[in-house]
Amino acid sequence: MSALRRLGWTPVLCGVPLVAVVACAALGSWLVPDATRQDMALGVVKAGSAGHLLGTDKLGRDIFQLSIAGARSAVVGPVCIAIGSMVLGVLLGTLAGYRGGWLDIGLSKYADLLLAMPTTLVALVVAGLVGGGYWVTVAVLMVLFSPTDIRLVRSAVMTQVTRPYIESAKVLGLADRRIMFRHILPNVAPVALATMLLNVAFALVGMSALSFLGLGVGPGEPDWGRQLSDARKLLVANPAAVIAPGALIIVTAAAINLLGDWVQERAERSARQR
Amino acid sequence: MAASSTRHGVVHFIAVRLAATLALLLAVSFVVFGLLHLTPGDPARNLLGPRAPSPAALAAVRAQYHLDRPFLIQYGYWIGGVLSGDFGHSIRSGEAVTAALADRVQLTVQLAGLAFVMTVISAVPLGVMAARRAGSVVDRTVSAGAVVGVGAPTYAVGLLLLYWLGQRLRWFPVFGSGRPGWWSADRWWHLVLPAMTLAIGIGALVFKLTRTAVLAELHQDYVTFARSRGLSERAVRALVLRNAFIPVATSLGLVFSFLFGGTILAEVTFSLKGIGAYLASSVTFKDIPVVQAITLLTAAVIALTALAVDVVAVVADPRVRRRAMS
């Protein structure tokens, strides 16, 4: 109880839906093995029918099972994107912030170029022309997310570089690589982790947007964005087919965002106290 | 003397900023032209589309796009055409890309404009109010709503609104773009729901920016000083708002970028025939000339907006001017 008072309600409120989504992602193929089974003869069934809590879609697939199975692509890709772009951000941002010079200028121009365009548009065009597919969109979004991470890490590193401990490390003759990754990185890590968490939410929204537009996951694969685009014409026949995946994306993204804000606030507070 | 040197500085700043914008657009145009070669397969076959190409057709398209010349020469021919308003012909329909875009640009401009107005008239006052009552129940409620709104995907919000306000309550039309025309009430009526969808996501962003900016100003010394001198709350508020306006206005470039990304999803969600939906379907069909045209035009609009906003900020605010010139 004292732990709850210390941490507040935010992690609990956000944690419960997130744990549920991650559990569905991990256990989905075991919980709902037949989620993508089609039953053309059945067709669209309204929500609340016997055996189909949320009804079925045009292909006779059960919306409830499909939504559970869709958790996997909503977790795996976005987490990979967030980790990958932060790895790029830490490597390049640390180098840029510590070394400066032409590398710094080059990276900031690269970031300017990528940030000059709407992410949705660039991701749509590049992933679409390359040919789409789940891992292609993951890779594209990873690259598109990296400039903000590079900038964040760069500026965090630059505030560290001027501190006395770096100077003493240099005087001791430590290798640059050791200074960057053993001494600076731990001080930058909390902010980087909080941003990574927030990136998972943006990546989830971005990935399912691409799936909604017909890229991302292949046809027939369980995915919330894909479900939304398939169910667009079912607003009359079975509204639950739209509401379920829509609400799942919104709730998951909001939970990650709130948790990320909370972590970020604490990371910044602890960085200030040090 | 001082005035003329200031004017000189402003001109210098604008010249530098303009050069940077042109350099950015040049870089973007290279990337956009490169899209033709990014697509897997032979560019000539890609330009001919799904039809089985005859050798004569292949030779014709190679000559038309100068595909047998080096990349830079190809680019030169292409950018020359672009600068005279010629983006080539659509692979799918065969019509000139410029004409096809002209048919669709009105809807997108109307949609983005309506969404922008909705965003500003709702998010800015809410942001100011939340900042003035920071920590109150109202502030926390709206701020929590903004977190949900910022993360909520356009297409999901759009479909939920379509279901609730369109299908259930029948307040708004659920299908079509309405009768075209700048002053067509039918068209604007059809755009309310899509614009509202866009405004929720972008409004959440603008709300956050406004709240942060006003809150930062309220903590400034001049506010305490103005209050201690006995200035009325009204006068203090006017001072704060004027100062907080600058960071909000300079973020308009970002807002525009979000707006253009959002229109793609909003148009597809609501089956509207605008530039965004045209881009999405052209990508699916690998209609490269159309994709190139829309990508480049979007980049140009966003870059020029950012430039205009920066210039206005420098001209309007002496503090920004001083910072920009140092």
Image (cartoon, grey):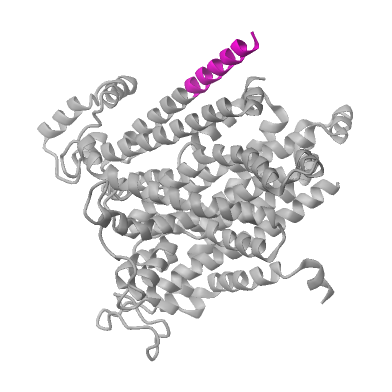
Where does the image place residue B145, in percent across and percent down from the top left?
Answer: 58, 63
Residue B24 or residue B287, whichever sits in front? B24
Residue B48 or residue B14, whichever sits in front? B14
**Drawn side of residue B300 relative to residue A94, left or right:** left
Residue A73 or residue A1, whichever sits in front? A1
Question: What secondary structure predominates along the stretch shown in magenta?
Answer: helix
Where does the image place residue B230, in percent across and percent down from the top left?
Answer: 79, 44
Image-quadrant location for residue B288: top left
Residue found 48% across the figure and 63% down from its top: A73
Image-quadrant location for residue B133: bottom right
**Drawn side of residue A67 relative to residue B243, left or right:** left
Q: In the image as oriented, which residue stretches furthest toward the bottom?
A: A50
Q: Can you see residue A217?
A: yes
Residue found 46% across the figure and 23% down from its top: B23
Q: In the image as oriented, which residue stretches furthest toward the top?
A: B1
Residue B14 is covered by the magenta coloring: yes
Image-quadrant location for residue A152: top right
Q: Quadrant of the N terminus of chain A?
A: bottom right
Residue found 20% across the figure and 37% down from its top: B99
The relative height of residue B74 versus residue A260 in the rendered view (above or below) is above
Where does the image place residue A231, in percent across and percent down from the top left?
Answer: 34, 69
Q: Can you see residue A214?
A: no
The stretch of residues the image draws in magenta is B1-20
Total numbered labels: 0
Residue B286 is covered by the magenta coloring: no
Where does the image place residue A44, in percent across and percent down from the top left?
Answer: 30, 80
The relative height of residue A179 versus residue A269 in the rendered view (above or below) is above
The relative height of residue A31 versus residue A174 in the rendered view (above or below) is below
